[in-house]
Each structure stands twice: as structure tokens, then as C-alpha cells.
Image (cartoon, rainbow, N blue to C red):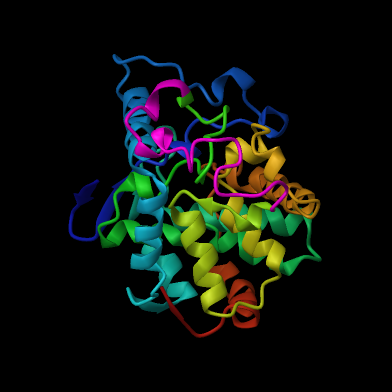
Amino acid sequence: MRILAENHVHLLDPSELLRPEPTFADKNPSKFRDYSVDTTDPLKERVRQTYRQMHLNQTVDFVKGRRDRWLKFNTIKMTVREALEKLNDLVDESDPDLDLPNIIHAFQAAERARAEFPEHDWLHLTALIHDLGKIMAFYDEPQWAVVGDTFAVGCRWGDSIVYRDESFEGNPDGDNPAYNTEYGIYEANCGVDNLLMSWGHDEYMYNVLKHNKTKLPHVACNIIRFHSFYPWHNGGDYKHLEAAKDEETKKWVLIFNRYDLYTKSEVVPDIDALWPYYQTLIDKYLPGVIEF
């Protein structure tokens, strides 16, 4: 990770760079999820190396260690607005065609959710705060443990995980018979809620919400937790671990991802004008000072 100026963090988020779901895209589907290897292309190579470090290092023991580090919620205290404004210092290198602060993307996503589902104010706030877990990047967490597509640890890695065939080489869980089978540490149809997920901003923010006793509905928390779990909701992996209730979660994750992935544009929302509405939602669902 490179620190820019005094407070800026350059963050390459490969999970936001080359996306699937061509159904919702305005671009040619071939432009999304192009994970072909081209060592002469600096951007592709950085994406590949980010996933290489993620897939090499994200083990059951590593995830348990990060949970022990971060889920004490003793890193910093701030309001939701303060956390969102801190994201102004997050320079996301994942989109080479658009250089906007993360907070602008947050409001773009929230406003699209608001336009499609005006009656679901919880969804508006979910879209606004879905990336808040990326504040870990300001506190020395390596980017491969903050961003990118997520996956379950403790069982055989899903077939649709990007760079699946080569990037897990050397990860000790692949040689551990307790973790390298189809079910691993899980039981059939245990439900995605019960999976130990690779560590990143999704899992962290989900736990921040639960720790701070958010009044957001559980499905909202699950949208945040699983929005980067592409091998599941887009790749079709882990079906043997799904519970019946997970279909509802998947439905809302796919709806949400339309706002997350395809709202980025140079049309900047009037954030000052929008703050009063969203502050009412913050006060309703996640008020006061939050422990991160």
C-alpha cells in the first residue's frame, strides 16, 4: 500500500475494477471481469498480484487473527458522517477512467437505490455506507486484506474464484485435509451466514454494524457482508452450503450491486443538499458515535 501526501491512501480494489453482471452494464460484456494474464499491462498485473497475495495469505488462521485484531472495535470512534468524509482521503486506483473520492461513489449508489426503491430507506443508507469498512486501509491493513472479491475459508476454494488455478499455490489450507474438501469445516446447507469469510471491508463493516446495534434490517447487513462474495452470488459456487433463506439475501445483493457497480460517472451529486436526508437515515438506523 502506498501512502500519499499526509492522509491519502492509494487503494487498488480489484473487485471494483473488472466486473461481471453484464445484464446491468451499459458497456460490452467483454469489458468486464477480464482477468486474462498480461504481464506487460501494469494495471492487469497489479490486479493479479493483489489477488496472488490475497489467495496465498488468506487462511483460516489468518482470518481468525484479523477478526481478533479488528473485532475488538477499539481502533477509532467516529460518527457515520465523519467516517464517510474520511473516505474523501481514499484514492481508489481500481477505476482508471474515473478519479473521484469514495464518498461521491457512496452518494451516487445511494441515490440510485433511492430512485428505484423510494419506499426502502434502509436500502438507501445501506448503499451509502457499504464501503465504510475500507477505513482499515488507514490503519496499516494491507490492501489484499481490505478489498477484492471474497470467498469462504475452511473448505475447498470455489471454482469461479478469479485466478483460481494458480494463485492459491502455497496457501497451506490447500494441503490441510480439514480445510481442502468440499465441505471442510461446514455442514451441508449450513447457510452463508455461518461461513468464515476471507477478511476484508465487507466482513469488517458487517461486524461493525452488529457490534454497534444497528437498527438496519438483517438483510441490509448481509448485503454489506456479501456484496463482494462473487464466487457465490455470481459464480454459482458454494450452493451445497446454502440454506433456503439465502435466496433472499442473494436477491438483494444482486439488486444492490447494480447501484454499486454501475453508478460511477462524472455526474457529481450535490452532497451538501443530500446530507439532511441521509442524516435522518443515519439518526434512524446507526446514530451517534460508532466504535470501529
Query: Which residue range is magenta in the image?
Result: 165-190
One can see residue 110 in this view: no
Relative to 137, residue 257 above or below: above
State the image quarter where residue 167 is shown: top left
Relative to 69, residue 234 above or below: above
Magenta segment: does it hold 189? Answer: yes
Relative to 280, residue 42 above or below: above
Give whichever of 134, 275 is nearer the camera. 134
Residue under the point 41% across and 67% down: 85
Point out residue 205 in the picture as x, y percentages from the top left corner: 50, 63
Relative to 137, residue 72 above or below: below
Q: Where is the C terminus found, in terms of image quarters?
A: bottom left
Point out residue 80 in the picture as x, y percentages from the top left corner: 48, 74
Point out residue 34 in the picture as x, y percentages from the top left corner: 50, 21
| In this picture, residue 160 sits left or right of residue 21 | left
| In this picture, residue 146 sits left or right of residue 224 | left
Magenta segment: does it hold 34? Answer: no
Point out residue 62 in the picture as x, y percentages from the top left corner: 35, 52
Majority SS type along the magenta span: loop
